[in-house]
Image (spheres, helix red, strand yellow):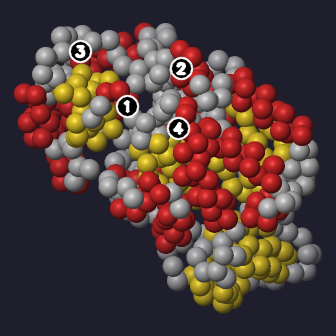
Amino acid sequence: MMNRAARRFAFMLFPVMIAAAQAGPLTQLKNTAQAEAAPAPSAGEPSRHTRAADALYIKVTANEEDLAAIQAGAASFERDDIGDRYITGYIGRQDLAALDKLGFRYSRTDSRDFRIPSGKEALKGYHTYETLTSELQELARKYPALASLTSIGKTVQGRDMWFMKISKNVTQDSSKPSVRLSAAMHGDEVVGTELTMNLISLLLENYGSDPRITAPVDNLEIWIMPSTNPDGTVLRQRYNAKRVDLNRNFPDFNSGPGSPAGRAPETVNMMNFLAARHFTLGANFHGGAVVVNMPWDTIAALPPDQAYIEAVSLKYSKTNEPMYASHSFPKGITNGYAWYKVTGGMQDWSYYYQNEIHLTIEVSGIKWPSGDTLNKFWDDNRESLLGFLESALQGVHGRVIDKSTKLPLAAEVSLQGIDSKAVSSDASGVFHKLALPGDYILSVKSEKYAPYSQPITIPEGGLFDFSVELSPL
Ligand SMILES: [Zn+2]
């Protein structure tokens, strides 16, 4: 990881380098990328110069936006793959010192790890869009009381974005906390698709017989989208079919909540769907590293509810052996910004604007590993996924009503004395606030009502039930 000072240094150089690179490598790369109708499976750009005989393959901790700076300083750098917070490529030995000087951290690696297998080999053990669709439809038919399948809209190429809702009495709207999981918004990071498909089957097939499975299905609304960018997966690329990086396509902190207009259809569908519902907790799955990435990605400050966020993240990593044993990330977790700044991500948007505590979980070092290794990934993540669902049942929930009319009330509910985000009650007056076990002062406010507060104790591994009637002023 590049330290802050070095990163700032690289950032200061950036404008100068943009000027130097005009009509240079960056521009050419961009044009090539746009003109490319069917990108090569490796997502690599065609080589424009002869690679030095002594070229090394390296993985640089950097953003896509850093590419121009890297190429201006180390001209021989030839980008191969772009990951969430790294760029891989070939570099002549003579340019390594230049990269050091720019302050970028890098490691030598094996180019084969970043190659997406081609043809039928790539699909062995994986769902295709067609098998994924038919399997989800079949499960919804087989478990009508527990599972319901919704398409939240179409992709650029007309594929459905499927969300499977799983809950007891699934067809009724409930006052349960809702959790959502989504995978493969980077289309070539496909392990999460298989993990979430397995989770769907696990929940549906064991409901009623295994209490560990029954409890979250009884007490939560669980929404799972195994394929967030199906076009990208079919094209075996990170981007959507118009080469938009969906995890850089959401409104940012400083751009305001932003309208969906002008964004990729996949982003628009997701924004509209999420804004219309109140999700309590969520995660989206990626590949290219093995770590739980916590908010914020956009700014250095720690987010509100940091203690809860870190505890949920550690709960996930602790039961995932390779993640917890990570050499790169102590205990398998990291603050997003401390790893590398990302703007326009779904994680920060979800928490900042939608009040859904959201994590980005990187589940495989290799983005598209051989299908015969998928069982191992499931073994590593199964317990963590169940634990994550259970984390949505830790806190306080309840209902706010008007004392005189007994009608539900829109109110703001917050925990005093800790840095914590307030939540709003929904149209039924229901609210959910995630928090660690402990003693708090809970306060409830609504315009034209007398404010209310009360000491509460949130139990270990459970919800404090709380209902309040506010008196009109
Ligand atoms: Zn990703």
- Sequence-wise, the earlier of marks 2 and 4 is 2
Q: Of the numbered discs in the image, which one, if any, rests on residue 23?
A: 3
Secondary element at tag 2:
helix
Say which residue appears at 27% left-offset and 35% top-offset.
Answer: 109
- Sequence-wise, the earlier of marks 3 and 1 is 3
Closer mark to the observer between disc 3 and disc 2: 2
Q: Residues within 10 Å of mark 3 (few under 14, many from 20)?
A: few
Closer mark to the observer between disc 4 and disc 1: 4
- Sequence-wise, the earlier of marks 2 and 1 is 1
Q: Of the numbered discs in the image, which one, if any, rests on residue 389?
A: none
Closer mark to the observer between disc 2 and disc 1: 2
Residue 158: where, in percent of width, then height? 69, 19
CB-based contact (under 8 Å), mark 2 and mark 4 = no
Query: Which amino acid is tagged 1?
Result: Asp
Closer mark to the observer between disc 3 and disc 4: 4
Q: Looking at the image, can residue 212 be seen?
A: yes
Q: Residues within 10 Å of mark 4 (few under 14, many from 20)?
A: few
Q: Of the numbered discs in the image, which one, if any, rests on residue 373?
A: 4
- Sequence-wise, the earlier of marks 3 and 4 is 3
Q: Looking at the image, can residue 427 be seen?
A: no
Q: CA distance from mark 3 to mark 4?
A: 43 Å
**Picture quadrant of residue 105:** top left
Q: CA distance from mark 2 to mark 1?
A: 15 Å
Secondary element at tag 3:
loop
Query: Which amino acid is tagged 4?
Result: Thr
**Residue located beneath label 1 in the image:** 113
Compared to residue 365, the image places residue 455 above or below, namely: below
- Sequence-wise, the earlier of marks 3 and 2 is 3
Residue 187: where, in percent of width, then height? 54, 29
Closer mark to the observer between disc 3 and disc 1: 1
**Picture quadrant of residue 407:** bottom right
